Amino acid sequence: MSDLAWVPQSCTLPIEERPLRIAEWDALFAERLAALSRRQPLHLRLDLVGGEGVEGRVRDLVERESGCCSFFTFTTTPGPDLIRLDISVDQAHAPVLDALAARTTAAGEQR
């Protein structure tokens, strides 16, 4: 899924920086994804294996992503062994969440 067509026009991240940001997310998911659930169409829940520096890495990515894609709502909940990342969008951005879920699954399968 290297095509960036799924990235919405409302994303303000410069086009040349998008592949780098996507690679950061893909690497995080490939290294740390423990579970993914989608109990509602507009909500994605990810459980990431914790470890030294992981919470900071997640929070940094979330902060930067929130700055360019304001349609995402991120909630980070650290636990003793896992970091839960809840991601929500509005109805207009459901296809973006679908694409993110597919990328996350694909990256997580590389573990």
Image (cartoon, rainbow, N blue to C red):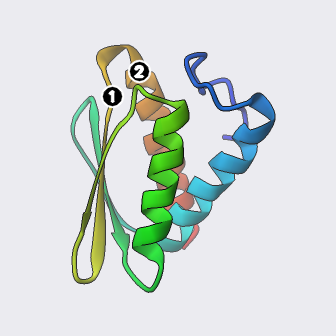
Residue 79 visible in the picture = yes
Q: What residue does disc 2 label?
A: 93
**Image quarter in which the N terminus is found:** top right
Residue at image position (43%, 43%) is: 101
The image position of residue 75, as x and y in percent, is 27, 49
Seen in the image, is 19 located left or right of residue 99? right
Vertical placement of residue 53 versus 85, above or below: below
Q: Secondary structure at mark 2?
A: helix
Residue 20 appears at what percent x and percent y? 73, 49
Q: Residues within 10 Å of mark 2 (few under 14, many from 20)?
A: some
Q: Nearer the viewer, residue 110 or 91?
A: 91
Give how far across and how far down residue 22 sits, in percent.
Answer: 64, 47
46 to 74, vertically: above or below:
below
Which quarter of the image is occupied by the C terminus? bottom right
As drawn, 32 above or below 102? below
Name the residue at 68% across, 54% down: 23
The 10 Å Cα crowd at callout 1, few under 14, some 14 to 19, many 20 or more, is some
For image coordinates 37% across by 76% down, the residue present is 49
Looking at the rendered structure, the kind of residue marked 1 is: Val
Rendered image: mark on residue 54: none
Circles 2 and 1: CB distance less than 8 Å?
A: yes
Quadrant in which residue 28 is drawn? bottom right
Question: Residue tagged by mark 1?
Answer: 89
Q: In the orientation shown, which residue stands out farthest toward the left?
A: 39
Q: Secondary structure at mark 1?
A: loop
Give the CA separation, mark 2 to mark 1: 6 Å
Front-most of 82 and 67? 67
Image location (x, y in percent) of residue 32 = 46, 72
Residue at left 58%, top 67%?
110
Q: Amino acid at mark 2?
A: His
| Residue at far right of view | 16
